[in-house]
Image (spheres, helix red, strand yellow):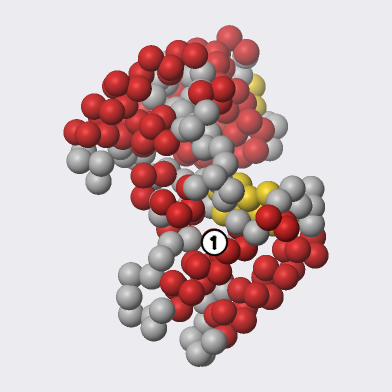
Amino acid sequence: FTAVKYDQSKINAKWVGESERNQERVLAAILTFAPVLVFIDEIDQKLRRSEGGDSGVSMRLFGRMLEFMSDPGIRGRVLFVAATNRPDLLDAALKRVGRFDIKVPFFVPEADERADIFRVMLNRYANFKWSIKEGQLRKLGADTPGVTGAEIEGVVVKATDLAAREESPVEYRHVAKALSLVRRNTADVDFMTAAALLECNDLEFVPPKWHDKMDWAQRVFAGRGGE
């Protein structure tokens, strides 16, 4: 599969009819790459019905995309994959079978996963110039419950900066210091976790430990009024 990214904001244009023509060019291009994977990031923001004020352009673009995604002629040739932190905000028409058949939840990483994320981010930002033992990586993972991958990335960026000031490879002490300095900025983790769990339509993709948390997810979601 070839992989491409679909971004409707780059299709929009100011001239009458130009947005629709741009979209048709993009869809035609997608077909030329088939078999192709089409990725849509932050789909709750990037692909939605019009809220008015654009003479119906957004509604037409949205409707055409729904038509394209559900075309049986492209099934098996064009695979759509999308990501969102707020699946509850997706238009119901997007979630029907034939457009997005499987909804897979991704949860806050576990301790071992956090240790692995620290390793990946250290390689990326410290350019492999770091000196932290495996046991120390595992301790970092164990000591950061509830921390997201994005927050780990921010910590490693800070640790890399601290080490650079000393002209030193990144060491455990730099990461520990960064953890004490960088404030967490991911909000509503419980709510987004609950929404992801409730939207999942195939428990094969849910770790067994989460199978008995549906009642918890319902309570959390209901507590926010479903927004």
Is residue 114 at all visible to an observer of this figure?
no
| 54 in relation to 46, above or below | below
Q: Relative to the observer, which residue lies in front, 139 or 146?
A: 146
Residue 98, given in percent of the width and then of the height, sits at 59, 48
| 127 in relation to 71, above or below | above
Q: Relative to the observer, which residue lies in front, 155 or 198?
A: 198
Residue 67, given in percent of the width and then of the height, sits at 58, 64
| 18 in relation to 127, above or below | below
The total of numbered circles placed on residues is 1
Mark 1 Cα within 10 Å, few/some/many (few <14, many 20+)? some
- Type of amino acid at the residue the image marks with label 1: Leu
Residue at which label 1 appears: 66
Q: Residue at x 21, y 38 (%)?
A: 224
Is residue 48 at all visible to an observer of this figure?
yes
Q: Relative to the observer, which residue lies in front, 171 or 48?
A: 48
Q: Residue at x 62, y 81 (%)?
A: 21
Answer with left or right where residue 114 lies relative to residue 223.
Answer: right
Name which quarter of the figure residue 7 lies in: bottom right
Name which quarter of the figure residue 220 lies in: top left
Residue 39, given in percent of the width and then of the height, sits at 62, 52
Q: Residue at x 41, y 30 (%)?
A: 197
Q: Residue at x 72, y 70 (%)?
A: 28
Residue 164, given in percent of the width and then of the height, sits at 57, 38
Which residue lies most toward the bottom here? 16
Q: Secondary structure at mark 1?
A: helix
Q: Relative to the observer, which residue lies in front, 81 or 123?
A: 81
